[in-house]
Image (cartoon, grey):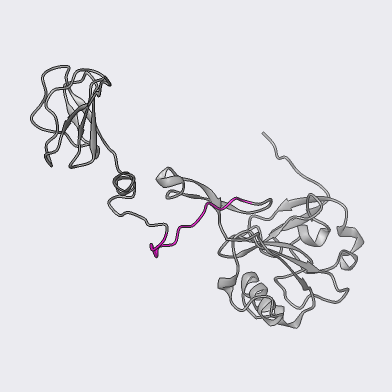
Amino acid sequence: MAVVFQQLRSSSANTPPGDLEPGQLAFNLADSKGYIGNGTNAKTKADGSAGTPSPTAGKGWLEFNLKASDIAALLTGGSTPSLVSDSRSFTAPVTPTAGQVLTWNAAANGGAGGYVPATPGSTAVYSLANNAASLNSGGSLTADMIAGLIAGTTVTAKTDLHAGDAVIVTDSGSADASANVGPGSYLYDGTSFLKQPGGGGASNLGDLLNVNTATSAVSSTNQVGFLVRDGSVGTETDPGAYKVTTSIDAGTY
């Protein structure tokens, strides 16, 4: 004769068990919930709240859901996603590609935070000629660069740019159209364009002297010597902030 073994159970809704021995199982068939004794002094429900009344010491239990829909609702905060009719869109994680700019996002990784691409795609590199008339907007370096990009139909507005985008200004052999923009590379930091150093440092004496003058136009007597910061010029990026001198006096003591 076959022996049928049935676990401790109840068919009454909202009726969890009282005490359970460590490892003992119980089920509520009406609520589709299970319980396992864990040897503690508390009854812990599936949502983390405490069950009442308190159990006998050492005879507490853990509650768990038996239905997949109840488990999904618990994980999603009470809403149950449907693979067929749910209209919500779920965005898959974005894997960074080489050269992308990453920013910290506290909401990434389920709220644990993580570095994610600052833009959906790779950063862009644009090109402009130094003599492009559109570069001369009459404003700042950034204003000139944006005017040039828009005139070239590369972008339609400043909002099309992303942090990490770069612009290469090529040397056409003609004079610069803008006093702010010369041949070289410029990086957009999300707010403004910054000129990047070329060749590991200044490319010519004109760069170091902060003047828009070709090296050949600087007199030969000024092409050899020391560069000295002129403290009377307020900002070191202003024209004339550095002077050429052939001697340095360390002073007396």
Please identify the residue farthest to the front as the structure is shown: 1
Residue 104: x and y in percent read: 50, 49
Relative to residue 33, is residue 120 depicted above or below? Answer: below
Residue 141 at what x, y percent from top left? 65, 70
Which quarter of the image is occupied by the N terminus?
top left
The answer to whether residue 62 is above or below residue 124 is: above
Residue 114 shown in magenta: no
Residue 91, position as x, y percentages in the image: 49, 57
Q: Residue at x 88, y 53 (%)?
A: 224
Give the magenta range. Answer: 84-96
Q: Nearer the viewer, residue 26 or 238?
A: 26
Q: Main secondary structure of the magenta part?
A: loop
Q: Quadrant of residue 153?
A: bottom right
Q: Residue at x 11, y 23 (%)?
A: 55
Q: Quadrant of residue 90?
A: bottom left
Q: Is residue 88 magenta?
A: yes
Q: In this rendering, is residue 152 above or below 248?
A: below
The location of residue 205, given as percent across then percent down, is: 82, 58
Using the image, determine if residue 125 lies above or below residue 157: above
Quadrant housing the C terminus: top right
